[in-house]
Structure formats: structure tokens, C-alpha cells
Image: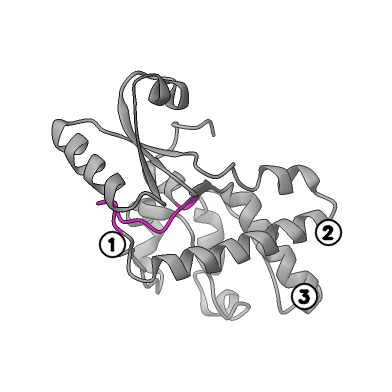
Amino acid sequence: MAPGQASASAVAGGLLHPLTPKNRIIWSGLEGFEATLRLVEASKAALSNAGDEAAARRLHSAQGTILRPALTPQHVLDYQAAAAKLPEWLEWLEGCVWQCRANNPGHGLLLRNSIVLSMPDYLRGLWLSLQQTHGNTTVLKWEQCTFPISQAIKDNNNDAAAAAYDVIVLASGAVICSFPARKHLPIDLVTGRT
């Protein structure tokens, strides 16, 4: 899918930085950011070890690629104040500097040290890392489905089929709330907090 063509939750999983939507450091955000960077490196190494240099290269963007445009006069004030408080993480951009980065006129924040992950490559790399560390055993099993997965759910919506798995993880973002088969499954939703 091309950038800008998916819902926000489809993209948000790949935006890596320790900030809240209000441009503050989130609780344990710095520790989480550092831990995630270690996972990114493990994923990248596993992709390289598996010979997939293309995936290793596209795993993440260069640092400082996330921009937050200031769309209202209040955004301008809030973003400028945030950049003054957290200069190691935020930089106020305007004029030609903003236009060169965003390819649009305007102004806003650059999230320094942020990166954008390719989530399919990142998750595949983590899976490969597990396999490389623990061996390619039947204990570890990866199945990737794309929406709609109604037949997979129907096939697994009985005790005999479900017994083949200890845990099933559905990673889908906010769209899971509209997933028709959800009401028939024992799913515990985990939601984010800011």
C-alpha cells in the first residue's frame, strides 16, 4: 500500500519515537524506545543472516523522518513550546526548511531521532531472529493472514482446530472492532494508552 493510503492505525505501528500526541516524553518512553531499537537491530541482523538484504535495508528509514504539521494557530504555539522544552527530540521547522522536508508549504515539528519501520519486514525479522536463536522447531509457527480472514476463523472456531494453538495473536489495529467474526471468538483487546 502506498504511503498515505492506509488508515492511521495501519501506519502508526511503524512510527518509532518516545513521545505522546501532546509532544511530551511518554512514561518509560525512553526506555521503551531504546529496547525497541535493540529489537530493530536483532530483526535487521536476522534478515541479513537469512540473505534478505533488501528487507534489511528497507526495515527502517533514516532518523528524523517523522513530521507533525501545525494545522492550527494553537498547534503553532504548542509545537514551538514543545520544541523549546525538548530540543533533543523536537525541532520547529518553517519556511523553506519545512517545505524541503514535507514537500508542502507550511510549518511544524520534526521528530528528531524518530524512525519509520516497515512493519512486515520488522515482524518477519523478529520471527527469523527467534528461529535463528531457538532453532526452526514446530514450537514456533508463523501464519500471516490478510483481511478478510473469515475462512481461517471459521476453520479455527471449534475446539478441535483451536487446540492446535496455545495463543493466536491478531495484529490489526483499530479495524479489529469492525471484524465480524470477533464476537464469536474469545478475544481480549489490548488498547494503547497515552
In percent of width and height, residue 65 lies at: 49, 39
Determine whether, in the image, residue 83 is placed left or right of residue 119. Answer: left
Chain part drawn in magenta: 13-24
Front residue of this view, candidates 167 and 70: 70
Residue lying at 73% horizontally and 49% vertically, measured from the top left: 56
Let me know if residue 20 is in the magenta part: yes
User: In this rendering, which labeled residue sits more in front, label 3 or label 1?
Assistant: 1
Q: Label 1: how many residues lie within 10 Å, few (<14), some (14-19) or many (20+)?
A: few
Give the amino acid type for the residue marked by disc 1 in the picture. Thr
Mark 3 lies on residue: 133
Front residue of this view, candidates 54 and 154: 54
Mark 2 lies on residue: 49
Mark 1 lies on residue: 194
Let me know if residue 91 is in the magenta part: no
In percent of width and height, residue 64 lies at: 50, 42
Q: CA distance from mark 1 to mark 2?
A: 36 Å
Work out which quarter of the rendered image holds the N terminus and state it.
Answer: top right
Determine whether, in the image, residue 166 is placed left or right of residue 11. Answer: right
Give the amino acid type for the residue marked by disc 3 in the picture. Thr
